[in-house]
Amino acid sequence: MSARARLLLVVSWALPGALALLGQGCALAHEGAAPLPLPPPSRYLLETVESPRPRRALARGPGFDPNAGAQPEAAPRPAPETSPRASDVAAPAPNPATGPWWSAFADPALDALIEEALLHNHTLRDLRGLYHEDMLAPARPNGPLWPLQIGIPVAIERANTVAALGPSSGVGVVDNIASAGVTASYQVDLFGQLALQRRSFDDFTAIQGQSAEAGAQNVAAQVAQVWFEILAQRALLDVVQQQVELNEDLARLVEDRFEVHLTNHLAVLQQAQQLLNTRAQVPLITARLALLGSELSALLGRVPSPSTALVPDDRRLPQLPPPVQVGVPSDLVHSSPEVRAAQIRVAEAEHRLGINKASWLPVISLFGDAGWQTFDFKQPLTFDQSNAFVTWAYGVRLTWPIFDGGQRLIEAKQLSLTVKRRNMLYEQAFLEAVRRVQDARIQEAKQADNVRTLQSEVELGRRVLGEARHLFEQGLSDYLAVLTALGNLSDLERALIQARRVQLSYRIQLYRALGGTWSRAIVELKD
């Protein structure tokens, strides 16, 4: 392709865009958020998740009634009542999109620890610091006076010019030049180039701000998870210690019956083995509590300590707070920091594409300078003599880039692909946010069924153990039934604690998936 053809191609591509930009002026600085590339669903899809129906035994033959003999499902027994505590008092369901979700647990100690972590967590402070650093980027246009450049140029020069008059002769001229003055230039943002640059820098800062908000929400969720894990381990330790006492009581019972030849030595050994197995759980739980204490203190920005004194001793695993107001999936565009960041990345790429288009337009600058100049260093400098001159100039300068070897054309194609790719990532981030909310809601609902079933099993296990012990004491059964009932009850009590802990974990995951705007105030803080 010839140079003339290339020039015509560039002009034909740039001229329509230039005319459009001339008409729009500063309209290149787009306002508003990028819309979703696909229509969001109207609700979270949970109706397809149903509990399986209980199977009934099939019978064949005339007159068979499939409902005959079916027993109604027994209602689950209520959990044993405990004395009310501050952490058990039902609090009104907070709206996680606007306020802190941890207030739903109504525990001032938990509130204080999360607030301390949001202020002093080292990872969050680093993210917050990067956000404030990006706000002070030197190249970012700030205010209407940003393109004003003022300088004081000073120059002292000695120049020697030799003109040859012949093969062996010439004339040399020596000039001594000194100058000083003040210069100023100002770029007029007539076509919005500076506005687009400012918006691009704002996008970079906003992306870092969303990263810091995601970090703040992660820290709050981590502190709550560790808090409830400590409570669960304490409850598990209490259960194990109660089981140790129960095993010691049964061991004495078996030994007494062995001494009067009412049972064999195998029962004594089996009970001793069960007692040692239960005692072996205590150091493992204690070590787990120490690790959780170190993790909690590190999240708070403190010196790591294995002590769990930050969690008051009177706290117990609370009941699940009231249901969460999840809203509709489209709310995640404004509440999820991950979705907000993906949305801003789309806008940032679009603004860079606008900067590329604006680079085809002329840059208009106002300039002015004033100073003095001399060509004689021997005489004193006085402005009323001919050895010093006052200089000044002002005007308008227009620079219009026409051809750059096709770099801007290639950059425009690249940015168009970037916008398309980031729209895809924006869609992916939104769908991932919807999935996290749906998964957390499903897990919480099914875990609640699991907790109710385990509570019924624990109650039944206690009755089974009591009956087996009564029969053993009456000599109507061997010790194997007692040992089996004791092992089953121990497993069920531990499983119930873990199930309640997992249920709280799913609720925290739901809060985190819903996000919120409360983290903006945390990011705006300055250390």
Image (cartoon, grey):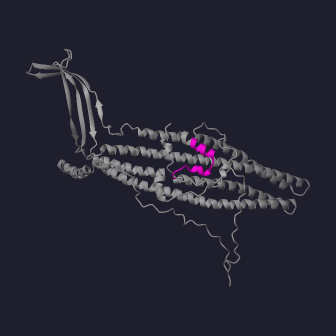
Q: Residue furthest right?
A: 260
Residue 208 in which image quadrant: top left
Looking at the picture, how far across and down is residue 111, in whole percent?
60, 45
Please report the residue visible at 67 percent of the width from the left and 41 percent of the height from the top.
Answer: 309
Q: Residue furthest front?
A: 92
Indicate left or right for 238 with 195 as reference: right
Give the mark count: 0
Indicate left or right for 188 with 346 as reference: left
Looking at the picture, how far across and down is residue 285, in whole percent?
69, 46
The answer to whether residue 101 is magenta is: yes
Compare residues 94 and 12 and report the one nearer the observer.
94
The answer to whether residue 243 is magenta is: no
Please report the residue visible at 90 percent of the width from the left and 53 percent of the height from the top.
Answer: 259
Q: Is residue 351 above or below residue 388?
A: below
Please report the residue visible at 31 percent of the width from the left and 37 percent of the height from the top.
Answer: 147
Compare residues 277 and 470 and report the one nearer the observer.
470
Q: Residue furthest bottom?
A: 62
Magenta: main secondary structure equals helix
Compare residues 482 and 378 and report the one nearer the observer.
378
Indicate left or right for 64 with 343 as reference: right
Please report the residue visible at 34 percent of the width from the left and 43 percent of the height from the top.
Answer: 197
Indicate left or right for 163 with 113 as reference: left
Q: Is residue 264 above or below residue 201?
A: below
Looking at the picture, how far across and down is residue 387, in whole percent?
17, 19
Residues in magenta?
Answer: 97-116
Looking at the picture, how far across and down is residue 158, in whole percent?
21, 21
